[in-house]
């Protein structure tokens, strides 16, 4: 794995339309992410945070998507930042912030690795569009946008006509899907490992099958990890918790398998909300999982 890591913070809460998650990057830094990765042996540069402004109005004329213009602006800047770091030969590690920031991260990654596979580790599918979303919150649309579906101001971010391949995209940990998402997932052929598959097959088997999909004919793998993919018992500080999630230990195993495969070229960890947390527990879990995905071992 690339030994040069660039940490990029995106204190975005507009996609979730709920305050607190904008403090996620600070909480993750406070939990010691830079020091932990340096201890493993990486050269880490903290690039600071992209500035996010809060508009007075939460809608854009002609659409039900909340804070569309500012979310598009931030993700365009994030795309350029990620692409710039990859051009320098660095591994972009984006910390959030709500999951709408995946739009910019993935667009930037695809600029350099247009055939990337993606592991989307999340309780939710994030595959709504303006037509199917029950809330208008863009953090529930980010994967759909990355696949090329959604408002033009979002899908136009990044390289023209370069989108994720749904056949090289895997959802892990899903247990809360809206009706429109279910139909869309089936239509596009995105592979989903729900909690049923994780319980029945075990995380090791799920990851083995997922890795076959995201590495077959791809030029790298991006990890997009939402902390609400884990059970709220382990990660209470998330905005949309869903009980019955992936355990702390199962998540470490998943990250360890990713590390051993040595295919990861970029990553993001999102939806840490310190206001809803207990003693910064969720941020500490995020940092621990980052340690595992970057190859940290007990002995």
Image (cartoon, helix red, strand yellow):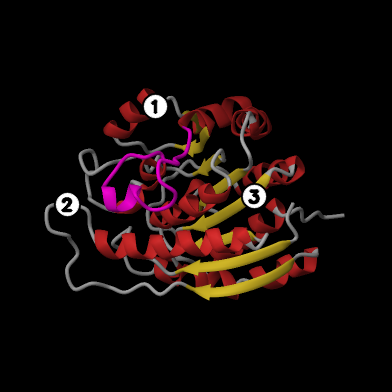
Q: Is residue 109 above or below residue 213?
A: below
Q: Give the percent coordinates (x, y) of residue 169.
A: 51, 35
Near mark 2 (Cα within 10 A), the count class, few <14, some 14-19 or many ≥20, is some
Find numbered disc 2 in the image and state the secondary structure of the residue it sits on. Answer: loop
Q: Give the percent coordinates (x, y) of residue 54.
A: 28, 73
Residue 115 shown left or right of residue 66 in the figure? right
Front-lying residue, 221 or 175: 221
Q: Quadrant of the C terminus?
A: bottom right
The magenta region covers 147-165
Q: Give the percent coordinates (x, y) of residue 191.
A: 49, 28
Front-lying residue, 15 or 28: 15
Near mark 1 (Cα within 10 A), the count class, few <14, some 14-19 or many ≥20, is few
Which-is-in-front pick, marks 3 and 2?
3
Q: Give the percent coordinates (x, y) of residue 243.
A: 44, 44
Residue 59 shown left or right of residue 274 in the figure? left
At a point 37% along the width and 65% down the height, the residue shown is 74
The residue that label 3 is drawn on is 265
The residue that label 1 is drawn on is 188
Q: Is residue 106 above or below residue 198?
A: below
Separation (CA) of disc 3 from disc 2? 34 Å
Find numbered disc 3 in the image and state the secondary structure of the residue it sits on. Answer: strand
The residue that label 2 is drawn on is 64
- Residue 63 magenta-highlighted: no
Separation (CA) of disc 2 from disc 1? 24 Å
Separation (CA) of disc 3 from disc 1? 24 Å
3 or 2: tag closer to the N-terminus:
2
């Amino acid at each position: 794995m690339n030994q040069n890591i660039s940490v990029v913070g995106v204190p975005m809460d507009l996609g979730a339309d709920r305050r607190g998650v904008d403090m996620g990057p600070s909480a993750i830094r406070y939990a010691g992410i830079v020091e932990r990765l340096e201890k493993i042996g990486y050269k880490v540069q903290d690039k600071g945070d992209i500035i996010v402004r809060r508009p007075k109005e939460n809608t854009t004329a002609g659409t039900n998507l909340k804070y569309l213009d500012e979310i598009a602006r931030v993700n365009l800047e994030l795309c350029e930042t990620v692409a710039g770091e990859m051009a320098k030969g660095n591994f972009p590690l984006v910390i959030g912030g709500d999951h709408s920031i995946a739009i910019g991260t993935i667009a930037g990654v695809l600029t350099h690795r247009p055939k990337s596979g993606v592991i989307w580790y999340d309780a939710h599918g994030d595959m709504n569009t303006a037509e199917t979303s029950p809330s208008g919150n863009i953090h529930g649309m980010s994967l759909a946008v990355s696949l090329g579906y959604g408002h033009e101001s979002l899908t136009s971010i990044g390289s023209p006509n370069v989108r994720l391949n749904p056949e090289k995209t895997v959802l892990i940990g899903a247990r809360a899907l809206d009706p429109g998402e279910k139909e869309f997932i089936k239509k596009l052929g995105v592979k989903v490992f729900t909690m049923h598959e994780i319980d029945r097959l075990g995380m090791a088997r799920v990851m083995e099958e997922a890795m076959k999909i995201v590495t077959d004919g791809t030029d790298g793998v991006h990890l997009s990890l939402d902390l609400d993919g884990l059970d709220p018992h382990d990660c209470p500080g998330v905005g949309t918790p869903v009980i019955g999630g992936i355990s702390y230990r199962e998540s470490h195993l998943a990250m360890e398998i990713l590390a051993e495969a040595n295919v990861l070229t970029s990553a993001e960890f999102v939806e840490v909300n310190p206001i809803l947390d207990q003693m910064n527990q969720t941020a500490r879990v995020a940092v621990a999982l980052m340690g595992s995905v970057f190859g940290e071992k007990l002995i």
